[in-house]
Image (cartoon, grey):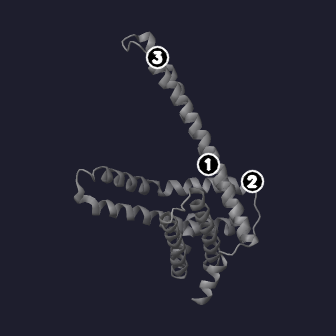
Amino acid sequence: MKDELVHFGRSFIISRKFIMIFAVEFFFVLLLYSAFSGWLFGIEYFSGAVSDVKNSITDSNDISQLVPLAETFKSFVFYLVLFSVIFTMLFLVLWAVSRMVSWNYLLRKKSSAKQAFKLMLLKFCWVLLWLPVNVILIVLFFAAFSALSANPLIAPFVNALLLINIAVFLITAYFGLFLYHSFFVHDRMFFEAFRKGFKAFPKMFFPLVLSAAAFFVWWLVIIVLAYLNLAYLLVDAFLFLYVFCAVKIYLIEKTAEAS
């Protein structure tokens, strides 16, 4: 256990390896935020155009005045779909490139455009695999949450659904470690990830507990900063990114050891 704690602590040291992973994650977040801001600006612009045309209507029974509204709304829907597709593609590209760079750097593998494209397809298939379960659980949670004010007795059910959603997310993330390790090292896919994930769980249990403890400490620090009126969004985000990168390095290395 002592050696494990030392290994875990080394992940938080600001070394060249840490700086590389931190830079990759930082630019991923920055570029993704820029892409999302552009998507949001475009949607707000065209929704504003719809509102302007709607406000210019003086007689709702006059069909001639409704024609411009219909045309503007069609344009809004078109650009909503277009911008959403562009944003989704940008997200997949940024995600694939950032994951490829960080994993290959830690595993000392070579990167390529072909590998990035295959990783995007892998991510898409992985999301589709878990999509039915996630959709059902999320819909159930929001449906129960919306009914909570009318029926407070269902609060335990709502809390249970929340915990189940979190558990499914953590399970997906856990097997995702072995999925990406199998992809980058052996170029294998789903079945290899589940097989290795189940087999390695006893070895991974303590590292997972340490990782959860790190995020719990981050949460406590945020609470203390808020209590001292020192909480700032950028500080909170920076601390989270620091902990996230350290935990990522640690878990990738432990996944490689356990595989």
Quadrant housing residue 125: bottom right
Q: What kind of residue is marked 1?
A: Tyr
Could you say where residue 196 lies in the image, as x and y percent from the top left? Answer: 56, 74
Residue 186 vs residue 47, the one in the foreground: 47
Left or right: 68 with respect to 60?
A: right
Q: Which residue is mark 3?
A: 56
The 10 Å Cα crowd at callout 3, few under 14, some 14 to 19, many 20 or more, is few
Question: What element does badge 1 sit on?
Answer: helix
Identify the residue shown where x is 31% and y is 49%: 146
Disc on the earlier residue, 2 or 1: 1
Furthest-front residue in view? 228
Tell me the quarter of the image containing the N terminus.
bottom right
Disc on the earlier residue, 2 or 3: 3
Query: Distance from label 2 to label 1 (Cα)?
Result: 23 Å
The 10 Å Cα crowd at callout 1, few under 14, some 14 to 19, many 20 or more, is few
Disc on the earlier residue, 3 or 1: 1
Tell me the quarter of the image containing the C terminus.
bottom right
Identify the residue shown where x is 38% and y is 56%: 137
Q: Which residue is mark 1?
A: 33
Identify the residue shown where x is 26% and y is 51%: 149
Query: Distance from label 3 to label 1 (Cα)?
Result: 34 Å
Q: Which residue is mark 2?
A: 113
Could you say where residue 120 lies in the image, as x and y percent from the top left? Answer: 63, 53
Question: What element does badge 3 sit on?
Answer: loop
Residue 259 vs residue 74, the one in the foreground: 74
Q: What kind of residue is marked 2?
A: Ala
Q: What kind of residue is marked 3?
A: Ser
Query: Distance from label 2 to label 3 (Cα)?
Result: 50 Å
